[in-house]
Image (tube, rainbow, N blue to C red):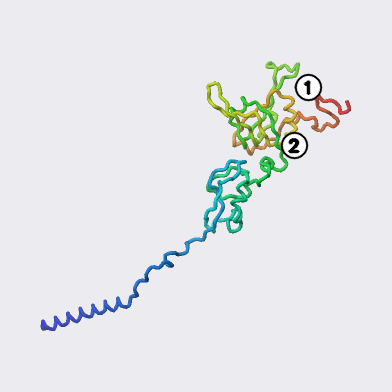
Amino acid sequence: MAPSRVIILGVAVAAAVGAGYVAKNMATPAPAEATSESVQQEPAISLTEVLVLSGDVPMGAPLGGNITWQAWPSDGINDAFITKEQDPNALEELSGALARVPLYSGEPLRRSKLIGEGHSFMSAVLPAGKRAVATQIAADTSAGGFILPNDNVDVIMTRRAPEGSGSASGYVTETILKNIRVLAIDQNMQEDEEGKLVRVGDTATLELTPQQAEIITVAQQMADRLTLALRSVADATEKVDEEADHLLSGSGRRGTVRLIRSGEVTEVGAGK
C-alpha cells in the first residue's frame, strides 16, 4: 500500500475517534449546581424530644433543675417515656417532684419513679400492707455506721436476765427480727478514737409487717439495747419463717394483758 494512503487512513481513524469523544461529552448532562435545598436534607431517622435526667438525683430528693428535653430516635421510645409532643409542660410541672428511687444522669425520666409534689416520701415508698416503724438503736454497735437505706438487717435485743436464769453476764441477747429492710436511718458525723470522722445513726426506720411492728414495740420497752446487724445483699430474697412472736401477748391466748416492769414481762388475766 502506498505511503500516502496509509497516512490518509490514519488521519481518518483519528478523526473518527475524536468525533466519537466529542459526541459522548455532548450527550452527558452537566452536573447540577448544589443548592441550599439539596444541602439541607431531612435527617436519616425521625427524632422526638424526651425528658431525661441532666444530673444524678438521690432517692427522696426533688428533681429541681436536673431534667431537660433531649432528642431521641422515635423508634426507641416507649409509652413510659415523657415526650414534649404529648406533655409540653412536663419540664416545669415535674421540677418539684421527688425521686422514689435513685435517678442517674442520661436516663429517660419515668413517672413511675417519681413522687408527686406534696406527697409523703415515706408513705410512697412503703409497700402495701407494710408499716414504717422508727426505733432507737445502739449507734456504736450498728455495723460501724455503714447501714444505709435499702440495706437488710437483723434486729438484736439485749436485756437484763431474769433472776434465777443462771446467766453469767447478767444479760440475755436474742435476735427478734431477721432480714428487715431499712427505709431510713439518721446519720451524723462523729470522731472515733483515732480522730477519724465516721457516720453513725441512732434512729432507724424499718419496713415491718403489722405483727413485726408489735414485736419491736414490745422490745423497745424491754430492751436495754437494740442493735442492727447488717445482712449480705445476697440474703435480700431469703424467706424468714421465724420471729420473736413470743414477745406478744396475743399468740392465740385471749383475755390476757402483758405487763412490763423493769424489763420483766408477765401476763395476767384481762380482768385482774
Which residue reaches farthest right? 271
For the residue carrying disc 1, how many other residues have a C-alpha within 10 Å: few (<14), some (14-19), or many (20+)?
Answer: few
| Label 1 residue SS | strand
Amino acid type, residue under disc 1 in the picture: Arg
Q: Is residue 232 above or below residue 30?
A: above
Q: Is residue 179 above or below residue 25?
A: above
The numbered dot on residue 210 is 2
Q: For this rendering, which residue is in front, 104 or 211?
A: 104
Q: Is residue 124 above or below residue 255?
A: below
Q: For this rendering, which residue is in front, 195 or 6?
A: 195
Image position, residue 76 (x, y; %): 54, 56
Image position, residue 142 (x, y; %): 62, 27
1 and 2 marks in contact (CB < 8 Å): no
**Residue at (53%, 53%) from the top-left corner?**
70
The numbered dot on residue 261 is 1
**Residue at (53%, 21%) from the top-left corner?**
194
- Which quarter of the rendered picture does the N terminus lie within? bottom left
- The mark that comes first in sequence, 1 or 2, is 2
Question: Splitting the image into 4 quarters, where does residue 160 fall?
Answer: top right
